[in-house]
Every structure is written in C-alpha cells, then in structure tokens.
C-alpha cells in the first residue's frame, strides 16, 4: 500500500501543480488517482492534507536534487546555473515551481503552506550559500560579495523566474538571465 500511496501523492502533486489548489476539486483528485472520493478522504483525510503531503514530497525531491548536484565533483558555476534552471522550471514546462505557486496562491491565508514554503526556501538559500562559499574558495567567484547576500539574491531570482515561467515567457531569455546572474558572482 505504501508504494501506491506514494504514487497517488505524486499524481496529486502533478494535478495541483497544473491547476493550483483552488482549481483542483476533490472529484478531480479522486479521478486522477483512480479512486472514489470516499477512498480519497479515508486515505488522505482531506484535500488540504493531501496538498500538504504533496508539497512536502516536492520539497524533499528538490532538496535531494540539490544535495546530489552539489555533492558531485566539478566546478560550482555550471551546477548553480543548472540548479536555478531546474528549480524555476526554465525550459521544462510552463508551471514554475509548485511551492512558489502555492505560496502565491494561498498567501497569508494558509499558515501551513507558508511554513513549508519558508522552510524550503530557507534550505535552498543555505545550499546556495554553501555552493557560493565553495566557489569562492576554488576561485570561481569573486570574494567581493557576501555569500549570504548572494545566496538570497539567487533565491529571489529563482522565485521570480518561476513566476515568469508560469506566465509563459520565452525560456531562451530566462536561460540568459540565469547565466547573467551566476556569472555576476
């Protein structure tokens, strides 16, 4: 049952990512998961509980991706560019980042979503800070900029790019923006 539940959470995450929280009905979730509404509620308690579980899954996957990316050997600069591109969804799809979307959609109306978003963004910023520090030690990045400030700027850029990707802008332009941001380090 665990594998099936994980698959269901993944499918629900994809639906929420495409349609947003408010735009996704419990019936659509049940149909997407191939279960009845009663089973949906028996398994996940509520639409909101499933949404939170999907957001936690998304966060775990993003952090695993970053851990794997930055634990690999090699120059930091191309890995930072790759991380920013993937996190914002540049060139992959026009859905942006599910966590940015959730925070923008629900704003201050949902403290649980805001806590998850803040936690993920804080952890991403910490990964960026560490990567920048490594890049400074290796001579890839200038010592002129504070690593913490630069990491905050990278995070803000990812969030902004995510919104622009969702709005349907040209991905080629966004790739150039990522290049410029990281090359400025």
Image (cartoon, rainbow, N blue to C red):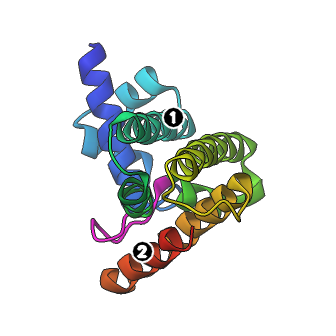
- How many numbered circles does the render carry? 2
The residues colored magenta run: 89-98
Q: Quadrant of residue 2?
A: top left
Horizontal side of 71 relative to 133 (left or right) equals: left
Closest to the observer, 177 or 22: 177
Residue under numbered circle 2:
179
Closest to the observer, 108 or 78: 78
Residue under numbered circle 1:
56
Q: Position of residue 175 (x, y in %)?
A: 36, 76
Which quarter of the rendered picture does the N terminus lie within?
top left
In the image, what residue occupies the spot 73% across and 58% down? 146
In the image, what residue occupies the spot 33% across and 36% down? 72
In the image, what residue occupies the spot 56% across and 42% down? 127
Horizontal side of 26 relative to 127 (left or right) equals: left
Q: Is residue 8 magenta?
A: no
Q: What's the distance in space between the residues labelled 1 and 2, CA to CA? A: 29 Å
Q: Quadrant of residue 7?
A: top left
Q: Is the residue 32 above or below the residue 67 in the image?
A: below
């Amino acid at each position: 049952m665990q594998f099936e539940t994980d698959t269901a959470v993944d499918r629900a995450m994809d639906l929420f990512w495409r349609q947003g929280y408010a735009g996704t009905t419990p019936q659509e979730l049940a149909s997407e998961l191939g279960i009845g509404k009663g089973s949906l509620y028996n398994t996940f308690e509520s639409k909101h509980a499933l949404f939170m579980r999907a957001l936690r899954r998304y966060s775990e996957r993003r952090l695993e991706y970053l851990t794997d990316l930055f634990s690999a050997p090699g120059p930091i600069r191309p890995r930072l560019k790759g991380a920013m591109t993937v996190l914002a969804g540049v060139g992959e799809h026009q859905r942006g980042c599910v966590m940015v979307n959730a925070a923008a959609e629900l704003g201050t109306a949902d403290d649980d979503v805001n806590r998850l978003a803040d936690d993920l963004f804080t952890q991403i910023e910490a990964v960026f800070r560490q990567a920048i520090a490594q890049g400074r030690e290796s001579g890839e990045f200038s010592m002129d900029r504070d690593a913490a400030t630069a990491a905050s700027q990278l995070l803000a850029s990812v969030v902004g790019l995510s919104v622009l990707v969702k709005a349907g802008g040209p991905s080629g332009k966004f790739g150039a923006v990522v290049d410029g941001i990281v090359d400025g380090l």
